[in-house]
Image: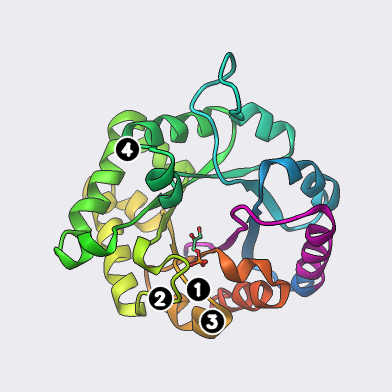
Amino acid sequence: MRERMVVGNWKMHGSLVGNKSLLDGILTGLAGVDSVHCAVCIPFPYLFQAQFTLQGTELVWGAQNVSQHEKGAYTGEVSAAMLRDMGCSITLVGHSERRALYGEDDAAVAEKFIAAQQGGLIPILCVGETLEEREKNITAEVVERQLQAVVERAGLEGFSRCVIAYEPVWAIGTGKTATPQQAQEVHAYIRALFAEHNSKLGESIMILYGGSVKAANAAELFSMPDIDGGLIGGASLDANEFVSICKAAKRKAA
Ligand code: 13P
């Protein structure tokens, strides 16, 4: 049976004081919540604070982006080894905001995926279609292209050490959540793509849903068979909301 995971993506939000109370609130709320992996992806400058505050706790921390390069003359970039040094175990790769605003194409995303793994991190590979693409009925094609670009460079083997996040761009920060059925349809499609090549991988790969997930809609989304948890933006900035979402990801006893 697949494990469950909920990841908060703080995006460009936070301050030393604010983070402290948010992290303390999450830690308090999560006490006794087992069987769900909970994590926060926070801005680079605060990774030191995360390491200091979260070391020895169950809450995992990571970054929102990583350089595809190992080291060198890449002003402003942060390598996977540096993230490991700060105690990160995960990093987002190919978030739609990186793709749309910073020109990260499929090839760059694939390189980042590989660099993250080589540096000892688990990449959370984000894929998803825009509203225009959904309206053109090419969601499956877009998601397949985004995944294929990484498979070609990292090989299928790379996918045994990663998490996929399906985030329809039209649902991010808009308050418009994909319906559980819409999300399930894409998750099942992604799983089937992997299963075609390797049935074990198809069964085991963890696929999170992201896009306006909140405490009020999390349980319904997470009840779908191919949704293994969530990647949470806005609602991860509120400790109570985030903790409720983590609790909603707990698998119901059969
Ligand atoms: P929201 O939950 O704010 O829609 O953001 C989703 C997201 O982009 C998480 O990576």
Asked which secondary structure carries label 3, the reply is loop
Residue 7 in magenta stretch = yes
CA gap, disc 4 and disc 1: 25 Å
Q: Which residue, given by chain and number where applicable, does mark 4 sit on? A: 106
Residue 74 appearing in the image: yes
CA gap, disc 4 and disc 2: 25 Å
- Whichever of labels 4 and 2 marks the residue nearer the N terminus, that label is 4
Residue 169 point in image, percent of width and height: 36, 61
Magenta highlight range: 2-28
Q: Which residue, given by chain and number where applicable, does mark 3 sit on? A: 252
Q: Quadrant of residue 106?
A: top left
- Whichever of labels 3 and 2 marks the residue nearer the N terminus, that label is 2
Between disc 3 and disc 1, the foreground one is 1
Residue 182 point in image, percent of width and height: 29, 74
Marks 1 and 2 in Cβ contact (< 8 Å): yes
Residue type, mark 3 in image: Lys
What residue lies at 79% left-to-right and 45% top-to-bottom?
51
Kindly tell me whether mark 1's CB lies below 8 Å from ligand 1. yes
Q: Is residue 172 left or right of residue 134?
A: right
